[in-house]
Image: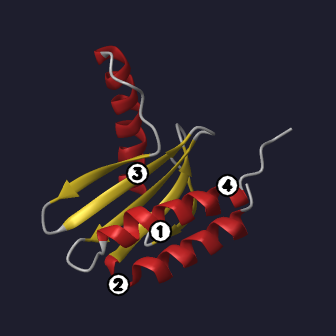
Amino acid sequence: MNIEKLQQGIEKLKKDLGAALLATDIWNTGVGTSLASYNSNPEGTALFDRATEYLKKTLETAGFPELDNYYLIELKNNKLIVIMVFPEGFQWSILADKEKLNMGMLLGIAIPQAKQAFYDAYQPEG
């Protein structure tokens, strides 16, 4: 993984979302250790690592289609969390202030560009 390129992706996300972006973190699924971040919250990263795995298993057990690109969680106090899930075994969280957030920018521009930044940085082993 090219960490410098991940950080560049985070910088782009910061520009795209501006004051709405409160925190973001990229980590290895199952490990929960941050690879790149802005205002990182290690406890939150560990929590969402476990939550994603639980969600995947629950969807499978219930016979629903599997989780695809991301999921959103609306929190109190006008906060929103996005968890992007990559099949390569990584996740990327975004914590945003909904009062300052343009959802069209988030869904139509920021998330697709963040995904592209991840793949630009991804270097499979072997």
Residue bearing mark 3: 83
- The residue under the point 34% across, 69% down is 104
Residue 6 showing in the rendered view: yes
Q: Is residue 70 left or right of residue 98?
A: right
Upstream in the sequence, badge 3 or badge 2? 2
Q: Are marks 2 and 4 in contact (CB under 8 Å)?
A: no
Check residue 72 in the rendering and tell me which mark sits there, or answer none: none
Q: Amino acid at mark 3?
A: Ile
Residue 79 position within the rendered picture, expressed as x and y whole percent measured from the top left = 22, 66
Foreground mark, 2 or 4, reads 4
From the image, state whether disc 3 or disc 4 is nearer to you.
Answer: 4
The tag earlier along the polypeptide, 2 or 4, is: 2
View extreme (right): residue: 126
Q: Using residue 101 as the reference point, say whether residue 26 is left or right of it.
A: right
Mark positioned earlier in the residue sequence (3 or 4): 3
- Label placed on residue 119: 4
Which amino acid, mark 1?
A: Ile
Q: What kind of element bears circle 4?
A: helix
Label 2 – label 4 distance at C-alpha:
25 Å
Give the residue pinned by disc 1.
109
**Residue at 36 percent of width and 56 percent of height:** 82
Residue under label 2: 19
Which mark is in front, 1 or 4? 1
| Residue 4, quarter of picture | bottom right
Check contact, mark 3 vs mark 4: CB within 8 A.
Answer: no
